[in-house]
Amino acid sequence: MTERYGYTGKILRVDLSSGKITHTPTADYADRFLGGRGIATKIYWDEVPAGVSAFDPENRMIFVTGPLAGFSGLAGSRWQVCGKAPAMTPEEFSYCNLGGRWGGQLKFAGYDGLVIQGKSDKPVYLFVEDDVVEIRDASALWGKSTVAAREILKEELGSTVAVVACGPAGENLVSYAIILADNDASGSSGFGAVMGSKKLKAIAVRGKGKVTAANPDKLKEVREYIRQLLYKGPHYAEQIAKLETHIEAVQGQKIRRDLCLGCTGYGGRVILESRDGQKRGKSLCGSSLFYLDKAMKYYGERNEVPFYVNRLCDEYGVDALAIESMMKWLSRCWHTGILTDENTGIPLSKAGSWEYMEALVTKMSLRDGFGDVLAQGIEKAADAVGNGAKELIADYVSKAGHLLTYCPRTFPVHGLLYALEPRQAVNQLHEMGLALFQWINWANGLEGAYLSSDVFRKIGARFWGSELAADFSTYDGKGLAATKIQDREYAKECLILCDFAWPIVHTLAGDHVGDPSVESRMLSAVTGLEVDEEGLYRIGERVFNMQRAIHIREGHKGRESDMIPEAFFTTPLKGHAMNPNAQAPGKDGEITSRIGMVVDRAEFERMKGEYYQLRGWDVASGLQTKTKLEKLDLHEIAQELGPRGLAV
Ligand code: SF4
């Protein structure tokens, strides 16, 4: 299957305007950009000029797997999608990554990636099975839900085919439209609408290929080591149980685990079945939780409404987390009287009910009545409503319409991680965020909790550059911590590893400090290339710089644009359901509360300066330097941005 281990050697290219199907060698990209986000970003840099809008046929949808895809026990079969994203305000390059098994099937079919360009004049779907690649008529699928389209294709092509599809929201170019694949893996940034704009309803893939590691013995050894880090100790079953009980399952619903292809086995991904056995669907993380509180308040008890709402969003193909901030805004507009049940046709007075959400999601997805206003995204909808509606958008919303979590008033370093990304980079926030939750258990004396202040400091030194990273009372050391987190997480997005499984920041074993070198060892075992931890981070840094260059080319203004919502500087922090006392480690590991904190504006700017310096960028402007770009082997970027004054 492979010329070089870990890769199939080919990237499939489909032009929907001309119907032309070709492929290019992965080797053109793999050395410098590895896979996943890295290769996708490079293709975007080369092929999508700055002025191209998200729905322009020249925009690309770039799907890329990584060198670890298809191998078992590594949680490395995720796949990345990049392109100009309509969910962003303003539109810009963005990304999403998905689990399930679609990425693995693409690789088994013989392709490391798939680049879609152009636009069909009638609805089509793409069928890929090894050497057979066909653009087929999809008129019978158009208008169907994501799940129905998937089921119809499986019926027709066989259940082993993996399908990614857009729903009615994507067909109607709703800016928050998602793509949905097998195992209900979903991807946001509005890529469902990009698919819709290309009249591409679905992509069905299946392959007979197999993956082979360059060094199977070494891979076996690494797998055993991972197992030891993840499973050792009596808490494993307990942790899985916790993962499975934070979801919205209610009594009488059936629940079964539904892991992605190649998972480490540690995942908490589950499928729920409704009490009446009629509905089945994933329950995972934010999308399963976003309607829970509201429904509880409305009905006064836990019921199946949050589950049905989650399904509704998936079926129409809209981003549940963008709906969450939309709901907040609608509710504020309703309380001030700007919007009413009558002038929207949505029962705003019944927020939390099934009827409310059914009307909201359906109208938005079909662009029906007021739904046509909402379909443009929250910013444009607020402009269209006027009467001060814009001021009522929630204070902490990302450019992609998501409510920001893991707040920088608690985590000073997160100010940088927010400011430097087009969307909320949850994987970066998880590195410190999830460790903090474990520390809170320890701070509150929970039995068996092992992540003490001492362990946190050691983790800081090993993962984030210094022990200072674990002192939340100061901005010192946070510029360095941000570079470490970004470089590691960009490498992870290239590999492309699951965020729920990687990195292993802490462990039950030994001194409880995890091991960030495992990723490079897996890569070496699979590809046969000698890549160490630092070598992997250099690739992450290169890809991160390439993304920065794309944003600069698309209008980002360096230091001036590297900002966070104003409210973080002005509104004191309150407790949060997950951390009611806003506990965090302070100086010397002291247990402190961040209640009442704001981000210090002067310190934030100082932290940015420290960060730019460490990155080798220009401290005053925040622009990249030609010298650093050359050093990162990004000559083409230095040559393009330099003469235009976009790199100094
Ligand atoms: S940890 Fe969860 S999301 Fe990640 S690969 Fe495993 S099942 Fe999939």
Image (cartoon, grey):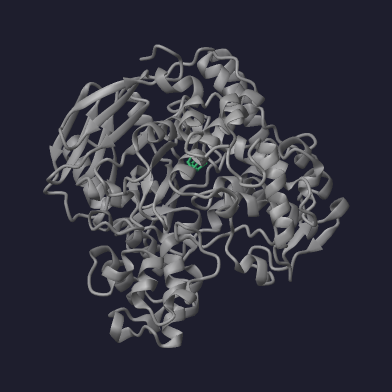
Query: Residue 366: where, in percent of width, then height?
Result: 23, 64
Q: Position of residue 261 (x, y in %)?
A: 43, 34
Q: Is residue 592 above or below residue 184?
A: below
Q: How many marks?
A: 0
Say if residue 223 shows up in the picture. Answer: no
| Figure check: 190 above or below 464 | below
Along the viewing direction, whichever of 443 and 301 lies nearer the viewer: 443
What's the residue at 31%, 64% (across, down)?
375
Picture quarter containing residue 565? bottom right
Q: Residue at x 23, y 21 (%)?
A: 131
Q: For this rendering, which residue is in front, 607 or 485?
A: 607
Residue 580, image quadrant: bottom right
Identity of the residue furthest to the right in this view: 588
Q: In the rendered view of the protein, which quadrant contains the C terminus?
A: top right
Where is residue 269 shown, x and y percent of the image?
A: 48, 47
Asked if residue 360 lies left or right of residue 264, the reply is left
